[in-house]
């Protein structure tokens, strides 16, 4: 189940026999919505309880505190993104095809799950999750750098610093994502995929 479908379920009134796992999903989905709309520090546990249509006590039954909810949300998004990248690695053999698929996936994710992408890119996670790795050092971004490194190792990408290569490949795409999230870019991101990818690949291709 992706974050978008969880959000849809989160705004529905829970049945009397709602299961604990479903309550967790509702709380996390409500937190995502509130954190992106108001920010972490302007969201309270009672706010999350109202949005999830559960009791405050229910939140504290499933999570230690607000930070624990934020951690579950952050780690869940990172895990889902990493699984998607693992699927890309399985279904695409070359660095060219893998990196293009990553860009396409990020564009599609922005269109279908804006709250998730907003939280990943804009939330200052280290301010409220100081023990977690920052997004740019998280496993998904490590995997994206690994795709670039593999491209250099097999001769598809010319030799350069791997951080530079990764920035060339995905930096423009991420900038367009933020423009889309900010309302600066009106067109759906997938409409720009071919042009953005061509520019990115030309910048690194051997």
Image (cartoon, rainbow, N blue to C red):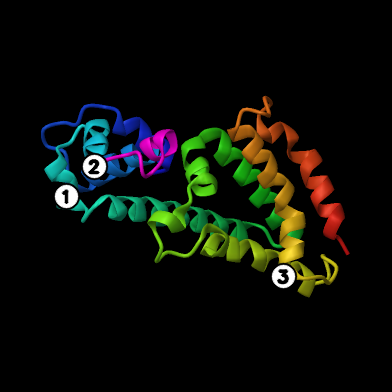
Query: From the viewer's perspective, is the residue at label 2 or at label 3 nearer?
Result: 2
**Residues at circles 2 and 1 in contact by the CB criterion of under 8 Å:** yes
Give the residue displayed 81% in from the left and 70% down from the top: 160
How far apart, in angstroms, are the residues tagged by discs 2 and 1? 9 Å
In the rendered image, the quadrant that contains the N terminus is top left
Mark 2 vs 3, N-terminal side:
2
Q: Secondary structure at mark 2?
A: helix
203 left or right of 193?
right
Disc number lying in front (3 or 1): 1
Nearer the observer, 18 or 172 = 172
Question: What x and y, as percent, mark residue 52?
Answer: 25, 34
Tell me the CA gap for discs 3 and 1: 44 Å
The tag earlier along the polypeptide, 3 or 1, is 1
Examine the rendering and report whether any part of residue 153 can be seen: yes
Residue 206 sits inside the magenta stretch: no
In this figure, which residue is indicated by the disc labeled 3? 149
Q: Position of residue 187 (x, y in %)?
A: 69, 26
List the residue tagged with mark 1. 60
Q: Quadrant of residue 75?
A: bottom left
The magenta region covers 33-44
Q: Nearer the viewer, residue 42 or 165?
A: 42
At a point 41% along the width and 40% down the height, the residue shown is 39
Q: Residues within 10 Å of mark 1 (few under 14, many from 20)?
A: some
Q: Disc 2 designates what residue? A: 45
The structure residue drawn at horizontal position 26% and vertical position 27%, both measured from the top left corner, is 12
Classify mark 2: residues with Cα within 10 Å, few (<14), some (14-19) or many (20+).
Answer: some
Name which of mark 2 and mark 1 comes first in the sequence. 2
Question: Does the magenta portion include 35?
Answer: yes
Identify whether 39 is placed above or below 159: above
């Amino acid at each position: 189940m992706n974050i978008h479908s969880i959000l849809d379920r989160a705004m529905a009134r829970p049945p009397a026999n709602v299961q604990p796992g479903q309550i967790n999903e509702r709380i996390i989905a409500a937190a995502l919505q509130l954190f992106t709309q108001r920010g972490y520090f302007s969201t309270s546990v009672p706010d999350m309880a109202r949005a999830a249509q559960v009791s405050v006590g229910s939140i504290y039954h499933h999570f230690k505190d607000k930070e624990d909810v934020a951690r579950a949300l952050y780690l869940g998004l990172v895990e889902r993104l990493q699984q998607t990248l693992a699927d890309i690695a399985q279904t695409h053999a070359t660095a060219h095809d893998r990196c293009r698929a990553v860009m396409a996936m990020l564009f599609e994710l922005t269109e279908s799950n804006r709250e998730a992408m907003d939280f990943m890119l804009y939330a200052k996670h280290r301010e409220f999750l100081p023990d977690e790795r920052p997004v740019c050092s998280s496993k998904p971004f490590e995997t994206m750098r690994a795709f670039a490194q593999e491209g250099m190792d097999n001769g598809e990408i010319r030799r350069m610093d791997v951080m530079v290569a990764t920035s060339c490949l995905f930096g423009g795409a991420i900038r367009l994502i933020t423009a889309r999230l900010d309302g600066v870019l009106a067109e759906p991101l997938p409409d720009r995929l071919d042009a953005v990818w061509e520019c990115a690949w030309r910048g690194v291709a051997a």
